[in-house]
Image (spheres, rainbow, N blue to C red):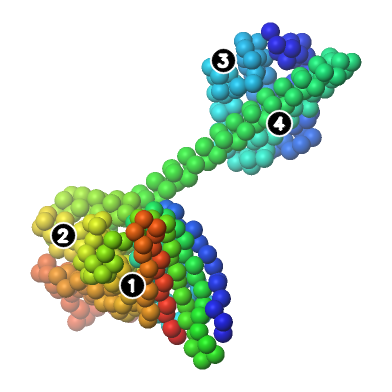
Amino acid sequence: MSKLAEIFEKYQADIITDWIKEMSAANRRKDLMSESELKLQTNELLHAITDASKNGNSSDINAPHWAPVREMITSISSSRAKQGFTPTETASFVFSLKQPISNRIRKEFGKDPDALFEELSASNFLIDNLGLYSADAYVKTREQIIVRQQEEMLELSTPVVKLWDGILALPLIGTLDSARTQVVMESLLRTIVETNSQIAIIDITGVPTVDTKVAQHLLKTVTAARLMGAECIISGIRPQIAQTIVHLGINLTDIITKSKMSDAFALALQRTGKTVVKRMQPLIPSTNSGAVS
Amino acid sequence: MPPRTLETLTLASVSDIVIARQRARHWAIEMKFSLVEQTKIVTAASELARNTVEHGGGGTMVISTDGNRIRQALKLTFEDKGLGIADVEQAMRDGFTTSGGMGLGLGGSKRLMNQFEIDSRLGQGTRVTVTRWK
């Protein structure tokens, strides 16, 4: 059994008390975590560290006998990342264990400088590694959160709306990178089948830049829809976008395009054999109601 | 007005292309280009940044100004240390592609901007410089 393990064993209760004190001195977030929860975590972690250092050397925390400690730090760090702790607050949970341990080592080996130095550097090395490990775990969790949010955004940003029987609209907004375009294309094609629509209006008013990549995605979507028996109209082509498309040399002549969505909708109604007529005598005076026959 | 570097961006992933577009738009607005010119500059930046990322394996985009007392210009320089282009003339031709794209990126960018220079060496990398005068 290493000397470090002996110290952990001998002064367990003292170390925990000091550790918690250390943490409240540094930056404990009372708003995010209760005292009892913190006590539970410190207790469990110190027990795990004690067990691990009893089972072998403490210079390599990636060794198999440190697995329980690593797991515990991962779960603590990731739960803190989710709760909204900062990286500093998360890492200082582990780092504030340094001082209490150093104090005990000093108490034990104060009279023997060589042993004191050796044990201090061993414990510092251990705590530093555990601290870094907790920072890594924190970042990993945050990355997972970001990936999940991106996925949620993919879903959110591609609504296919039904304008009329047989007429769908797909208002595109923002950057059309290939991941999003894939989702857009799939959801449009799926909705065409589900609603048995003949016409889909793709509106690009909210797309700031139409380059060759975006144009290619649009063309592919239009072609795929056509294979399924539906016709696409692209609307929302602003003057500057029209000029850019011409200069780029993109050929959109096979596709029906309109500058405004209302024009596209009017054309869609016409294509599906419907007309908008104004009543001679309004049902409700003062409002300008239209009807579709 | 002497040439001045405004910003240098790293192009490593697809998300950097979005940033490249945003910064190009920012400086085009700053230099008071018209809406049509802004859109042309941003679109060219998007095409060339994508080439740098997808074919050059990543690189940099430098936004700078150029010009004289009377006229000003916005200059974009894309540089990568990739494989280089074997046949530049062929790469410039509309419809030529090695990636399944439309093959209009280089030619299109040339038409969108006023000046277009390309310098590519096999095994060393590619540098494309485009300039738009006000």
Q: Where is residue A112 in the image (x, y as percent from the top left)?
A: 86, 15
Label 4: chain letter: A
**Label 2 Cα crowd, 10 Å radius (few <14 / some 14-19 / many 20+):** some
Q: Which one is in front, A290 or A269?
A: A269
Question: In the structure shown, which secondary structural element does the residue marked by tag 3 occupy?
Answer: helix
Q: What's the CA distance linking mark 3 and mark 1?
A: 59 Å
Circle nearer the viewer, 3 or 2: 3
Point 23% across, 67% down: residue: B90
Query: Which residue bears the numbered disc 4?
Result: A95
Separation of disc 1 and disc 4 at Cα?
A: 54 Å
Q: Name the residue under label 1.
A: B109
- Numbered tag placed on residue A65 in the rendering: 3
Amino acid type of the residue that numbered disc 3 sits on in the rendered structure: His
Q: Is residue A243 left or right of residue A10?
A: left
**Residue A255 coordinates in the image, percent (x, y):** 17, 69
Query: In the rendered image, which quarter is residue B114 located in?
Result: bottom left
Residue B81's place in the image compared with A79, above or below, is below
Distance, label 2 to label 4, CA atoms, is 59 Å
Three-letter residue code for mark 2: Thr
Q: Which mark is residue A7?
A: none
Indicate whether A12 appears above or below A270. above
Q: Which chain carries label 3?
A: A
Q: What residue would you read off at disc 2? A: A223
Residue B34 quadrant: bottom left
Nearer the observer, A286 or A73: A73
User: Camera-side residue: A14 or B78?
Assistant: B78
Image quadrant in which you'd find residue B12: bottom left
